[in-house]
Structure formats: C-alpha cells, structure tokens
Amino acid sequence: FSLFDKICIQNQSYYNRFMTVGVAADKMMITGNLKFDDDYPQLTTDETIDWRHKLGLQPDQIVLTIGST
C-alpha cells in the first residue's frame, strides 16, 4: 500500500481492516459508498475544487478510482 497516496474507505469497519494490515491512518479517508449505480449529477467546478482540497490533490494530479475490487 506504500504506492498509494490516499485510500478512500467506505466505512469504519473497512478502515479498521486496512489498519490491521499496516496501512497508515494518514493515508486513509472514510468517504462512504462511492458506487455509481444510479444517475448522479456532475459536480460543479467549485465542488470539484472542494473535493480536491479535502483529498489533498493538486489540480494537475490524475485520480484513479477503483471499485468492487
């Protein structure tokens, strides 16, 4: 897990599991369920900037989302 900058965790239970395998707490953030099984509105530019700020992402950084792994 050292190759990952940030790991978004669905809930406290998963957070605890990742902790037991040695993932650093500062690399994890509980974000809830991110599955897109419904139609969701696009984020506004301001919302996108806000999420990038919350996750510590620079505007030019690429985000890779992996679900149901």
Image: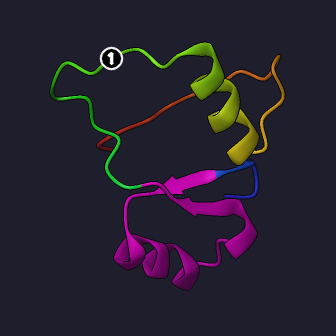
Where disc 1 sits, the SS reads loop
Taking the magenta stretch, the answer to whether it contains residue 56 is no
Residue 36 on image: x %, y %: 25, 29
How many numbered marks have been drawn onto this rendered protein structure? 1
Picture layout, residue 27 above or below residue 51: below
Disc 1: which residue: 41
Question: For this rendering, which residue is in front, 4 or 10?
Answer: 10
Category of crowding for the residue at label 1, using alpha-carbon neighbours closer than 10 angstroms: few (below 14), some (14–19), many (at least 20) = few
Within the image, what quadrant is residue 26 found in?
Answer: bottom right
Whether residue 55 is visible = no
Location of residue 27 in the rendering, given as x and y in whole percent from the top left corner:
70, 62
Where residue 59 sits in the image (x, y, percent)? 81, 20
18 in magenta = yes
Magenta segment boundaries in residue numbering: 7-31
Residue 17 seen from this side = yes
* Left or right, 57 with reference to 1: right
Q: Amino acid at mark 1?
A: Pro
Residue at the spot 53% in from the left edge and 16% down from the top edge: 44
Q: Is residue 6 left or right of residue 18?
A: right
The residue sitting at 46% across, 54% down in the picture is 31
Q: Residue at x 47, y 82 (%)?
A: 16
